[in-house]
Image: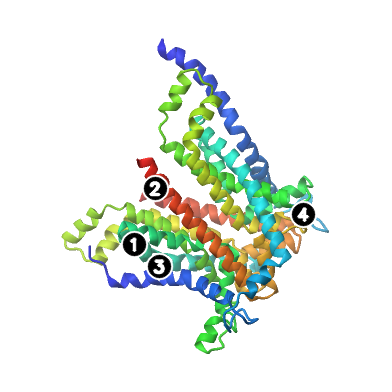
Amino acid sequence: MKSEVKARPASRGRRLGAFVFLSPGVTYLIVLMLVPLALVLSNTVFQRGRFGGVVYEFTTENFERLIDPLYLGVVGVSLKLATLTTLIALLIGYPTAYLIAQLPPKWKTVALVAIVLPFWTNFIIRVYAWIILLSGPGVINSLLGTDLELLYKQGTIVTGLLYSYLPLMVLPLYSAIERLDPQLREASANLGASAFTTFRKVTLPLTVPGVMTGCLFVFVPSFGNFVIPEILGGSKSIMVGNLIRDQFLKARDWPFGSALALALIAVLIVLLLVQARVTRRA
Amino acid sequence: MRRSKLLYVPFWATYVFLYLPIVVLVVMSFNSGKSAYTYEGFSLKWYGELVNDERVRDGLVNTLIVATGSTVIATVLGTLLAVGLARHTRSKTLDAIALMPAVLPDLVVAIGLLLFYGLIQLTLGLYSVILAHGLFSMAFVAAVVRTRLTNSDTSLEEASRDLGAGPVTTFMKITLPQLTPGIVAGALLAFTLSLDEFVIAFFTIGNSDQTLPIVIYSMIRFGVTPKINALAAILLLVSFTAVIAGQRMTKIGERRAQD
């Protein structure tokens, strides 16, 4: 009896509430995200207009161009540079996160804030700082008294990507390591395992989800980036991001640009699926 | 636990790597010479030139307009969305869609919006950027507010409903006051994200206006000068102060909540 009285107005209120609270945000998401995404996807099967824009006639040409070695090569370079960035970030990020997790609470906060602080400053400026350091007459060359060409190389792009996204590796690693029960490591040590064995058999397997998250956080923005390759890598279209940007703003070939964007999303979806798999198993 | 001294090498390498470029940039901004690279002595003249630079001033004003507009949109819609998702539906799909703008690569969001604005023949300008920034900021606000909602006690809201209050009254009198710290945090996040955002603004702003990141971008492409160093140093100072102040505020907030 009691529950009946309560249930009726609550469920009617719930439906009204759902509408009142959800409809503005959902409308916004549909109009400014789902419709634009649908446009990107549908564009991939249409032809480019003579002066830019889209002609709505079916074609598979955009996908044929996608597997042209020229463009596949660009995708390959992007994969290579993003992977390299992710690996280096993991190699220096893991020990850093590990040490931060062992610090006394007060220093822990300081160390963490110091990791994210550069991340909260303007992205363009962080990239720009590397020009001052690396360029021909730049600071590193003048300090060393050398005349090395340090800019406009693939390694420079990796440096820029690493600098921009390293905090995104350290933070998830830190929270994964922090959550570990220290007793597990003590038990392993008491049973005679060396520090390295404990790390390999206890710490690392238990922090795999954090490793995956960190790698994804670094890889995703690195893979599609066009600003860093442009500022630090010279003006060539060396990564997918540059290529997409150029199709939209220079060549004005929107359908092919959309097809490239679709390839970018496809790579990311594959990665997300792999991550979901590994995390579930861990 | 024993830990190898070797661990300290990557640890310190990380911090040197993160701060060396920033330190060099700030030092070079006080250069009295014309070069952005070779230090010739202390001077504040580049800061003076910056104040008189009209493009930088306009860029700053535009950036603030965009950040304010998009923060208002994102905070209102994001908060409503978070409450709706946490209290009025169990749809996982809706949950995922609400997070998408934060997860999608910015370049994909940018070209999608460019295509959409082209389709509806909207003339690009500051408002098209405000709408775009509102989109991903809303996702962040919704996520931040949602975390607070999931961790909060629902008994007060249930009591309010049992006493006959409708969903809107319950929201205004019970949920909203409890959520205020989360909403403020979400709004600050939205504002900062918009200040920094480059890629989406670059695609959706058109030719007439520029935000500060776009101004800096085009200045860099013209060549590096101590003036850009000075601008960079000021922006670094502003964001460092904001982050540290935010950190302090959350700490004080936590302490108060504990008392």
Residue at label 3?
A: A91
Q: On the rendered structure, is A187 left or right of B51?
A: left
Kindly identify the residue that appears in the image at 63 percent across and 75 percent down.
B226
The residue lying furthest to the bottom in this view is: A145
Chain assignment, label 3:
A
Q: Is residue A122 visible?
A: yes
Residue at label 4?
A: A47
Where residue B85 appears, as percent x and y from the top left, is 52, 35
Give the mark, 2 or 4, whose residue is nearer the N terminus: 4
Secondary structure beneath label 3:
helix
Label 3 near label 2: C-beta < 8 Å? no
Secondary structure beneath label 1:
helix
Q: On the rendered structure, is B144 left or right of B60?
A: left
Count of numbered circles on the image: 4
Point out the frontmost of discs 3 and 1: 1
Where residue B119 appears, as percent x and y from the top left, is 77, 47
Three-letter code, disc 2: Arg
Quadrant in the picture for residue B259 = top left
Separation (CA) of disc 3 from disc 1: 11 Å
Give the mark, 4 or 1, whose residue is nearer the N terminus: 4
Residue at label 1?
A: A98
Kindly identify the residue that appears in the image at 67 percent across and 69 percent down.
B50
Label 2 near label 1: C-beta < 8 Å? no
Where residue B142 appears, as percent x and y from the top left, is 53, 42
Where residue A100 appears, as percent x and y from the top left, is 35, 61
Three-letter code, disc 1: Tyr
Give the mark, 3 or 4, whose residue is nearer the N terminus: 4
Point out the frontmost of discs 4 and 1: 1
